[in-house]
């Protein structure tokens, strides 16, 4: 169900440029439970198969409403700084799998989440970010100036960059 929803999400497709998605796993934290600082494995074998994926992107889908538990923030440290994330049920954060991260202790209630990894068509985070920013700008220009020739020109640049960066 989660993977099917991801396939229908233009924002996820634009941000992750997914080639393969690791089947979601689930965690539950309560009563002071936490998960210490770590980096996700760079390669993961898909359970029950001989297939492996490179984990370019990590994702956490929050399943518990934030007001139902205290603590439990996902804390991500990357080149952009340190960010504590605690989202509404049904909201998801994606971030480079190379980011150091941890889950703060849950002091009240229960924190449920799904987590998984994505092998992107574009391995490099900087290149993915450039493509994401360009795609978001194209959408803004298209909304402000529908059918403007600049949209076609910018879209051409986007796809030529994707051709250079993508591994499929």
Image: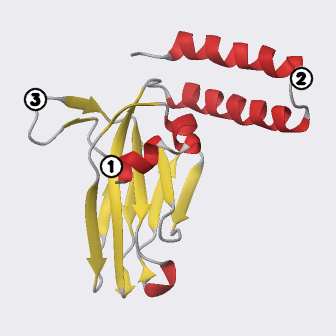
Which tag is nearer the camera, tag 1 or tag 2?
Answer: 2
Q: Residues within 10 Å of mark 1 (few under 14, many from 20)?
A: some
Residue 59 x %, y %: 41, 50
Residue situated in front as seen by the camera: 150 or 26: 150
- Residue at horizontal 55 percent and vertical 59 percent from the top: 83
Where 118 sits versus 78, above or below? above
Where 61 sits versus 86, above or below? above
Q: Are marks 1 and 3 in contact (CB under 8 Å)?
A: no
Query: Which quadrant, please, contains the C terminus?
Result: top left
Residue 45 x %, y %: 17, 36
Q: Residues within 10 Å of mark 2 (few under 14, many from 20)?
A: few
First in sequence, mark 3 or 2: give its number: 3
User: Which mark, residue 148?
Assistant: 2
How far apart, in angstroms, are the residues tagged by discs 3 and 2?
48 Å
First in sequence, mark 1 or 3: give its number: 3
Q: Is residue 33 visible in this depiction of the protein?
A: no
Classify mark 3: helix, strand or loop: loop
Classify mark 1: helix, strand or loop: strand
- Residue at horizontal 29 percent and vertical 75 percent from the top: 29
User: Which mark, residue 50?
Assistant: 3
Where 168 sits versus 112, above or below? above
| Residue linked to disc 1 | 116
Residue situated in front as seen by the camera: 1 or 93: 1
């Amino acid at each position: 169900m989660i993977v099917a929803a991801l396939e229908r999400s233009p924002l996820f497709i634009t941000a992750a440029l997914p080639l393969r998605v690791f089947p979601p796993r689930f965690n539950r934290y309560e009563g002071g439970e936490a998960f210490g600082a770590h980096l996700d494995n760079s390669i993961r074998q898909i359970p029950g198969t001989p297939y492996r994926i490179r984990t370019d992107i990590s994702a956490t889908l929050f399943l518990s409403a934030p007001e139902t538990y205290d603590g439990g923030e996902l804390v991500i440290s990357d080149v952009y700084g340190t960010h504590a994330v605690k989202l509404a049920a049904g909201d998801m954060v994606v971030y480079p799998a190379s980011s150091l991260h941890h889950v703060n202790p849950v002091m009240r209630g229960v924190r449920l989440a799904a987590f998984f990894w994505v092998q992107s068509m574009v391995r490099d985070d900087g290149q993915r970010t450039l493509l994401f920013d360009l795609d978001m700008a194209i959408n803004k220009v298209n909304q402000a100036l529908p059918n403007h020739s600049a949209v076609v020109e910018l879209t051409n640049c986007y796809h030529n960059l994707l051709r250079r960066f993508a591994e499929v």
